[in-house]
Image (cartoon, rainbow, N blue to C red):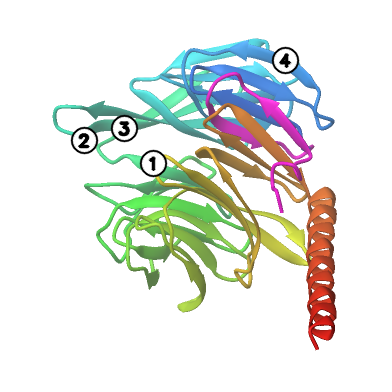
Amino acid sequence: MDLFTAAWMTRSMDEAVAAVFLDEDEQLFAGGWNGRFKHWNAEGDLLWSTQLNDRISVIFRKGDHVFATAGLHVTCLQANTGEKVWSYALEGSADSLILYGKKMYAISSVYDIEHNDFLESAIWCFSFDGTLEWVHKMDERPWVALEFENHLLFGLGRPKCGLLKLNEDEERLHISTNVDSPITSGSSSSERVLFGHADGTVSNAKGDVVHIEDASIEDIRTLKEGYVVALENGELVRRIDAEKVWSFEGELVTIQAVGFTFDGEDTHWSGRWSGSNGELQVRNCDTGELLAEESCTRCESVSATANRVAVGFQNGQIHVWEAGMFERRLRNKNAEQKQSVRHSDLQNKLRALRER
């Protein structure tokens, strides 16, 4: 199936896409590599477009406000109008942010080109009105921040590694993991949270080892049962506990997400990049069956809700797929293929009769 013609809508950023975000009402926010920021409603109408300081890497919405990282800045905008409410320049690049309770927590880092390493990182706590409440500076870079069971967990790099736990009273507690390896990614569900490490280890919120993969973990997605990891060597692996359910090798995985259901099973979306050619694949998350694929430019960002999946590309395009339309197109394509096979079989039988 041609994935792009099956898209519910296609929109353009007019520059390379850096971040996409679908909110709970399926409205689309997208940021570009040069700071362009756009918002479309659930019907696909452009509501506003504005310009921020630099590349937009992370977007979140909370109520009437949308928050984004842009270069050195964290910025808050009015969600319905795009009007800037406040912006704050951090000490170093604004790497990520997370919304928790009535506060926003931003992660920054200072990178030293000569030493090819991070010199200092920090967690910044802001109230929604832009008031800076506190800054916690550290040597370790927090590579991921997740909410789980009424607290925040920050996955740390060297030298400490492990987790930084922030509870509702904002007390900070360090949790050591059973492996001395930087945390590179993480993912949570209502039941559990999992972290991927540079040495291939998968660990849980207590720091216990769940499994060890064959290569460094670039990204991990927690599922109802088990997880899917994208490894540094280009392999995608689906596991339940330690048992491998499926795996596929290929080029570097640039994005992955768990999307809407098809035939009662979740879909798994992944983008690969060879350095010159890209590929977008959709699979049955449980079995690994390939449902659809498409050659493309580099996939830069993905966001998914229960009914839609949005993918942003290096060429500036954003494609959004809707569950019902995706299912109809896929079923029609499968029906056409079966009809073509039957027609071909009939032609072969008639030809055999004529040649008798």
Q: Secondary structure at mark 4?
A: strand
Q: Is residue 11 magenta?
A: yes
Q: Is residue 226 visible?
A: yes
| Residue stretch rendered in magenta on the structure | 1-25
The residue type indicated by label 2 comes to Asp
The residue type indicated by label 3 comes to Ser
Q: Which of the two residues, 194 or 346, is positioned nearer the viewer here?
A: 346
- Image spot of residue 42 (x, y percent): 81, 32
Q: Secondary structure at mark 1?
A: loop
Residue occupying image coordinates x 19% and y 34%: 116
Q: Secondary structure at mark 2?
A: strand
Q: Which mark is residue 121?
A: 3
Q: Which residue is mark 2?
A: 117
Q: Is residue 151 visible?
A: no
User: Are the two marked residues, 1 and 4, in contact with CB atoms closer than 8 angstroms?
Assistant: no
- Left or right of 238 on screen, residue 275: left
Label 2, residues with CA under 10 Å away: few <14, some 14-19, many ≥20: few
Label 1, residues with CA under 10 Å away: few <14, some 14-19, many ≥20: few
Which quadrant of the figure has residue 348?
A: bottom right
Q: Which residue is mark 4?
A: 48
